[in-house]
Image: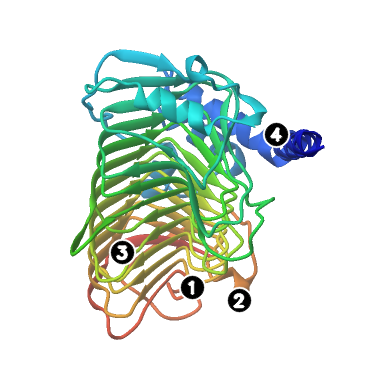
Amino acid sequence: MVERRMHINCISRKKDVKNQHSRLLKHSYIGKLMKKNELARQACKPGMARRDFLTKSLLLAVPALIGVGGPAAAAVSAVSNYSLPTLSRGSTVLSVRNYGALGDGIHDDTAAFQAAINALPAAGGTVDVPPGTYVIDPKVSVRLRSYMHLRLASGAILAARRNSEERAYVLMLFKLSDVEISGGQIVGDRDNHLGTTGEWGHGIQVLGSTRVTVRDILVSKCWGDGVCVGGAMVADAAPIPSRDIMISNIVSTGNRRHGMTIANAHGVKVYDSEFSSNRGLSFACGIDVEPSNDNATSSVLIENCDIRKNQANGIMVYKRVQGVTIKKCYVEENSGYGILTISPYDGYITQNRIRHNMLVGLMIRVRTDNYQVSGNYFRNNNASLHGVQYTTATAVPIVGMVDGNNGTGAHIAKTSDCTNIKVLTNYYAK
């Protein structure tokens, strides 16, 4: 009798998981995300620039610019000029299927993934994930190791098993080096999460790691962030920060907290990516650059990214942060500020397209020091006051900050305690 009850419970649990992920995959929103991720994968093929997939979709969505050239045009058409870093790893290639992963959207494949990773030799190598839907338990996490590439095929989905934890991660990188994650999707459990508290149910958690590349992947529906990069806590010692992190050509969307958090980290580069529609918590941003506790963050580049429709700010740069450059990004239709700085120093904001944000396009606050703002294109910000206006009025170049109805007030504002703020020529339209 006990055996029969266990069998019935097992069937019920399998049906529950299968139904959950069937709903996710069939939902039109996820279907759109899958199509977008396919574009991201195509952008990596020979002969097509990485930025093209995002540029093309934006050009379809954005009305033609009339009377605007230079920086605004560059924000539309520029392609990031960078190369992926060369990471150290061995030549061994293993498949999760050979270690028991079924990828049927029903069975828990966490242990099979871990077995494949653990089977790599000391020199590391590549673990392949063929097409399929793999249920992963975030309470356990798939723990990557140094000198490895987790390579997801087109059509490979890591689907988070529903849970009630405040802190849980689909993929965990803890004090590692030379790790690459590419391809496929991670779909979180935010729509079916069993708890109501916590904000740390991340798709990818990187802690105290060095030389990490995350590219060509779609991360969505996480209880916390799509991607979180920070420091590793160590007993009786200072946390170990993450260093030399490359985020390239990813889409992080529909998460409950942020699209991406950059916490205790140095040397983070984010290229050609989208952080959109991250909503659920009142402070949810596209990208949050914010060191935790008394730690610090430095040398962050965010370039050619699409940051839009987030619940709070598009990008927030908060407190002990030095050397953030935000360049050639679309920052638009966010429900808070387009870009908000609070107490960082030594930053550069240039050649971005900042428009239709509900609050001021760029808000510089609370002892922000030594920031330069130049070559940006602003249109119809502070839309909660002025309304959303989809016009094609010619943008006007203005040097500095100018008050009045035809000035820069809806687009750039700063508090009196900020110092060494250099606002050069930018372009403005109502």
Which residue corresponds to the image point at 27% horizontal and 32% vertical from the top-left?
146
Q: CA distance from mark 4 to mark 1?
A: 41 Å
Q: Is residue 183 visible?
A: no
Q: Which residue is disc 2 drawn over?
A: 385
Q: Which residue is disc 3 drawn over?
A: 291
Q: Is residue 14 visible?
A: yes
User: Marks 2 and 1: in contact by CB < 8 Å?
Assistant: yes
- Quarter of the image holding residue 416? bottom left
- Mark closest to the chain's N terminus, 2 or 3: 3
> Observer-nearest residue: 421 or 129?
129
Q: If the image is split into quadrants, where does the N terminus sit?
A: top right
Q: Is residue 149 above or below residue 250?
A: above
Q: CA distance from mark 1 to mark 2?
A: 9 Å
Disc 1 crowd rating (10 Å Cα; few below 14, some 14-19, many 20+) is many
Q: Is label 2 or label 3 in front?
A: 3
Q: Which residue is disc 4 drawn over?
A: 25
- Quarter of the image holding residue 278? bottom right
Image location (x, y in percent) of residue 165:
55, 56
User: Which amino acid, by three-letter code, is at mark 3?
Assistant: Pro
- Quarter of the image holding residue 5? top right
User: Which amino acid, by three-letter code, is at mark 4?
Assistant: Leu
Q: Secondary structure at mark 3?
A: loop
- Mark closest to the chain's N terminus, 3 or 1: 3
